[in-house]
Amino acid sequence: MPVRFRPAWALLPLWIPHVCAQPLLPEAPHSALEPIVVVGQPDGDRSTLTQPDLPAARQQLRRTPGGASVLDAERYREGRVSTLADTLGTAPGVYVQARFGAEESRLSIRGSGLQRTFHGRGIKLMQDGAPLNLADGSFDFQAVDALSARHVEVWRGANALRYGASTLGGAVNFVSPNGYNAEGVRLRTEAGSFGYRRLHVSSGGVRDRFDHYMAASGLAQEGFREHARQHGRRYFANLGYLVDDDLETRFYVGHVNSDSELPGALTKAQLERDPRAANGGSAAGDQRRDIRWTRVSNRTVYRRGADQVEAFGHVSDKRLHHPIFQVLEQSSLDYGIELRYTHRGELAGRPNRVTVGLAHSHGTTKEDRYVNQAGRPGARTNRTRQTARNVEVYAENQHHLAPAWSVVAGVQAARADRRLSDRFVAGTASDPVPEDFAERYRGVSPKLGVLWDYTPQVQFFANASRSFEPPSFGELAGGLRPNLTRAQRGTGWEVGTRGRSGRVEWDIVFYETHLRDELLQIATDSAGANITINARRTVHRGVEAGLHGQAFADAQGRVEWQVNGLWNDFRFRDDPTYGSRRLPGVPSVFARAQLGYRLAGGALVALHAESAGGYAVDFADTLRADGYVIWGLRASGRLLDRATWFVEGRNLSNRRYAATTNVIRSAGGVDGPHFLPGDGRGVFAGVDWKLD
């Protein structure tokens, strides 16, 4: 039976603040509403002008009239940290599933990038405030190392405007430690099933006006499936210099070396028979995604009284070796600058905060394609130069109408240029149609929100906004021929609450967005391959719920529980072909939960579970992925004074299931290779040492 609109409101009850009002223990240190630490003078503080820490991020969260969350890295370090699902899986509103138990994932917020299980789009992915996306809006999951983050910020939808993001999904920012809050030396090692091994070492410190943080990480695994080996090395560092009490500059350097075999998708019958098998074509073509990526960036902040000016600059170089249906060889050079000004003062006698920003980014990708001969380049099939350029101007103002009420208004204006030049054989007899194109996209995205501090610990909020997302080259030139599409635009609203009362902490949002020209694979080209075009009208609505709390506490310990759930209703609106059918690729109901007992000394024993409903693989709804429930056990604790440990078992029932799927136009009711198996039963363990 379909879920109706009215029950969704039942997930936003006004009685939540009064439930279980008597606390069992002092407030948990990871609460999103903990006391604020002033950012500025670094001596003894854990934040600097350029590199804010967790309390500063939570302060910003409290000023946001919409869906947003901050993840403490120390929380996800209590288990294995390998995939984005290990990191972002506990963030409300985030749907993330690893493709092969590896780094490439399906990452979607509010239905963003529905057709992507690789090379994501629809979200601004950042590290330390600088974008990891290429200039065309796409991003690689391999660029992230969650163990090199102190915390992670997730700004859903239009709530990411403070970062200049106007996409449907919003922004995710991995924030590194600085020299003031990092350990002198920290060493972490993990190992487990499927040949999994990981080593991470970091160091931080302060000397005079300089502070630094450095991290190096190595990962290797054979993989649950055949042809799923992965090897990666990552290096990240930041160096800050405090010019004076009002001025600080910080340089960031990152390098990623990642090699991944791609086992491909299976039919449902193959998944049930042997989920460890690789797709025959993927293995024969030695399909893989190998990346060499280097980034250098700078952030400089000047603060004087009520005024703050921030300047950002970044440049990145990426090399991609990607044998798939053809061998793709890409070299990309991207750079960008951004200026942001913030003033905190008064307007009409009330507190007022205004932020304005200007950003420019430019990227060039040289792509060569060859016939795939068992993973090696054969005869050349194409050669193009792809250029993306973006200019964004944004402004946001927050005004306190009363001590407990504030209103936030903002707008972003964006221009995006996409140009492709054919450097191969365009205009010859073998390829008589030139592929060159030049497209320009413009959009204006306003936002209006209201925030009510019902109590010092409980907030209610609502906002309305528009979104704008130009296509990346994955949509424009990802197939055999260019495929021009329009920019995706949306108009939406959300209403929700977050806070805590005694034993319970919550973050609950209902949202609805009406999209025009959503980028979806609902057509085929002349060769019969699925291509992306614009769906005329679609609607995305849903509930994002994050709940956790404590019970039965005494001097020996307490029971802890946590639930993160999604209800998704993504549909066509009066489409000539699909009517009001649901969009495929994401389950309508999805949840992760954990129930455990934490001893007074910090040791934890917990049961965790993941559940998903069935969903369609194709837009015609002729082939479906089955729902599933998987579960595992986790234990963690302290070893001596400076070390922690964990042991966890995953999918202990050894359930055979599809973690995610391809998304295609129509399967015609025929079982095809569209299912990506989740990992089977596995056991992992690790130790984390901290030294001053």
Image (tube, rainbow, N blue to C red):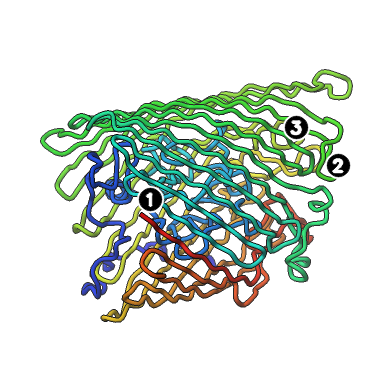
Furthest residue toward right: 429
Q: Where is the N terminus found, in terms of image quarters? A: bottom right
Left or right for 123, reference 182? right
Nearer the observer: mark 3 or 2; the answer is 2
Q: Is residue 535 above or below residue 218?
A: above
Q: Amino acid at mark 3?
A: Arg
What x and y, as percent, mark residue 539? Answer: 51, 49
Q: Which mark is residue 373?
A: 2
| Quarter of the figure with residue 98 | bottom right
Question: What separation in Å lies between label 2 and label 1 (alpha carbons)?
Answer: 49 Å
- SS at badge 3: loop
Give the residue number, with chain letter if any, for mark 3: 481
| Residue occupying image coordinates x 42% and y 66% | 644
Among numbered discs 2 and 1, the one appearing first in the sequence: 1
What residue is drawn where x is 39% and y is 78%? 597
Location of residue 299 (image quadrant): top left
Q: CA distance from mark 3 to mark 2?
A: 21 Å
Q: In the drawing, does residue 457 fall left or right of residue 301?
A: left
- The residue that label 1 is drawn on is 184
Element assignment for label 1: loop
Where is the C terminus found, in terms of image quarters? Answer: bottom left
Q: Nearer the viewer, mark 1 or mark 3?
A: 1
Give percent across and percent down for residue 668. Answer: 77, 56
Q: CA distance from mark 1 to mark 3?
A: 53 Å
